[in-house]
Amino acid sequence: MTTFSNIPLCLSFTILKFHSCLFLIISLMMISTRVMSQPLFYSCPNTTTYAPNSTYRASLEVLLSSLASNATRPNGFYSSSANNKVYGTFLCRGDVSTTDCQHCVKNAGTDVLKVCPREKVALVYYDNCLLRYSNQSFFGTTDENQAKFIFLNTQNTSGPILGSMLDEVLDEAATEAANGSAAKKYATKQRSYNSALQKVYALAQCTPDISPTSCNLCLRDAISNLPSCCDKSRGARVVFPSCGIRYEFYPFYKDITVSTPPPPAPRVSTPPNFSGPKGADSDKNRRISAGVKVAIAISAAVSIVLLIVAYCCLRRRTTKKYDAITEAKDMSGISTAESLQYSFDTIQAVTDNFSPDNKIGEGGFGNVYKGKFPTGQVVAAKRLSRSSGQGGQEFKNEVLLVAKLQHRNLVRLLGFCLEGEEKILVYEFVTNQSLDYFLFDPEKQKLLNWSTRYKIIGGTARGLLYLHEDSRLRIIHRDLKASNVLLDAEMNPKISDFGMAKIFGVDQSQGNTSRIVGTYGYMAPEYAMHGHFSTKSDVFSFGVLVLEIISGKKNSTFYQEDGAEDLINHVWKHWKNGTPLEIIDPNIDTEFYSKQEVIQCLHIGLLCVQEDVERRSTIASVVLMLNSYSETLPIPQQPPAYFLSNKAEMMNQLDLESDKATSKSIPLSVNEISITEMYPR
């Protein structure tokens, strides 16, 4: 037992304080360590589950034990399976020591069974490591069934954001990681970004089991997610199961290069003729000296503990600065078009070199191909077929404007490619193709019950309202039609091909154009005959679309079935004769629809296709009428009768572009994509 009887009182008191402080600090350190051991994020989809006492659980425990015992491998990566039932892997950050890696993997193996107690597929992510398992083998592949994680540093930058410099340092890190050694696909980069020599630090890493090409594509996909969420942040990371990218304004990783050991401290020798005090005084001094040594030792120990606690608190504080999101959807923070740019090689790779098997559509300005990134993200790439007549920077700027438009009823523009003569637009992939694919097919019409059709009408109206009034730019679509309304997995409508005028560089003046661009059967008469366009011309197209959705008939080809009469005048006759329900698509089960809703939609459709622009409804009033049965609707007037018996005769009466225009510059076809006029509010 240690006594302090021979130590000065003040020194004894100091040491007691050190003991109390030490106990407190150790307790705080244990709390801090426990907090830090929690995963930053986890994913456990409940698509497949297992029973608590099943063989899968037993195999999973064997797997987790195997992963933990192999966590001291130099490359920080290991894959294993158990009984051909469960497959798992871990990846430690490239700069983490083997001790820290093993500690992280052991914690992950414990935590994952708590946060995902019954799911056969799981992933947990920490600052130092990632662990995942599945009932199906994913080794050597970029798995598409796991979520992506985006961590945003919530501290905003006070100075100019990095722009192209950040793109360059991330690109360098990604390139070096992808082309690195097969054992450890890991790289870090740093670069000064202002006169004060402040630096940005970047890290890129892939699992070593995937190919360099897959690693490169995965990292490029991760980088492409940063602008949409984190443009003004002091740091962010995007983590996929097979790769991750991160940047910060402080050195968050360790420099794993070998450093030169410090020179040994010089020895202090005692003079040979020196002798200490003798007798009782000498013994007393020795005892005091021993007490001082104890105090110094304790002080040193406490100092070390304080440093450890400070480090832990700093790490904890850094972690708390992050917000985790699963998908980047808010594009409002985008500041540069370059942040949306994909390389041509990337688009070529994900579309399998624009394979005919991946072709999902075509229009007057180009073909559309389905593409799939290694992470599982599916996109639609529209490859523009001819020069747009505008410069590269202008093209980028217009893409940037359109990419910032976000609404649940609009197809999202994810980015673009601009290399040489190649101009490609990259959109989100919408699962169920376009409305015309269902609406005008005798068999697929049966899949569209009334509730689905009513949802499509309402959603399309809300999307058009956003373009006309709620977005930062007023956008006139000018080619709204069934083939430009796409349907997602839940049959929600998404308007596509808006904003194409600016992207494609069409020369036109506001409100009037000498180039008639659109689709026969949907164009408002003032636009088709005189080139006058406005939001009301979009409303006319919407009205035609509503009548098509209710009847299941296509306006532009209706004359083939009913002589020279077009669909809107056919509906008008039944409306005037008091038999509006006779035009309803017979595929709609009459027992499962509201007659009031159908009649109201027919009424709204007729209000939208009136010849007098002033009497035609606005899209805002349409949305209001769709949401209110008590609204008193105006009485519709007879729609225009300008639709002629055949398309050739229609084209002869249009006020088209000058004689210098070629046939390709008159994109009046059913398959044409839209041309849109945009002007600031």
Image (spheres, rainbow, N blue to C red):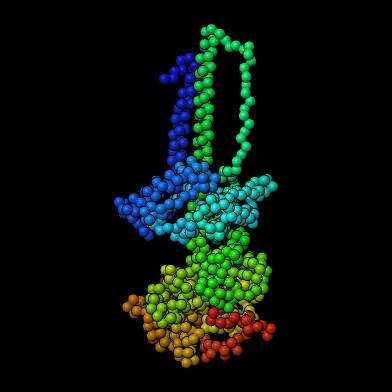
Extreme bottom residue here? Answer: 563
**413 over 450 or under it: above or below:** above
Q: Quadrant of the N terminus?
A: top left
| Front in this rendered view, residue 251 or 468 | 251
Q: Is residue 238 above or below residue 550?
A: above
Can you tell which quarter of the image residue 490 is in?
A: bottom left
Q: Residue at x 48, y 23 (%)?
A: 15
Question: Which residue shows up at 60% across the image and 63% down it?
Answer: 343
Q: Position of residue 588 (x, y in %)?
A: 37, 79
Q: Is residue 535 visible?
A: no
Furthest-left residue in this view: 53
Q: Residue at x 52, y 8 (%)?
A: 280
Q: Position of residue 252 (x, y in %)?
A: 56, 45
- Say if 278 sits above or below 522 in the image: above
Question: x, y (%) of residue 268?
Answer: 62, 21
303 or 187: which is nearer to us? 187
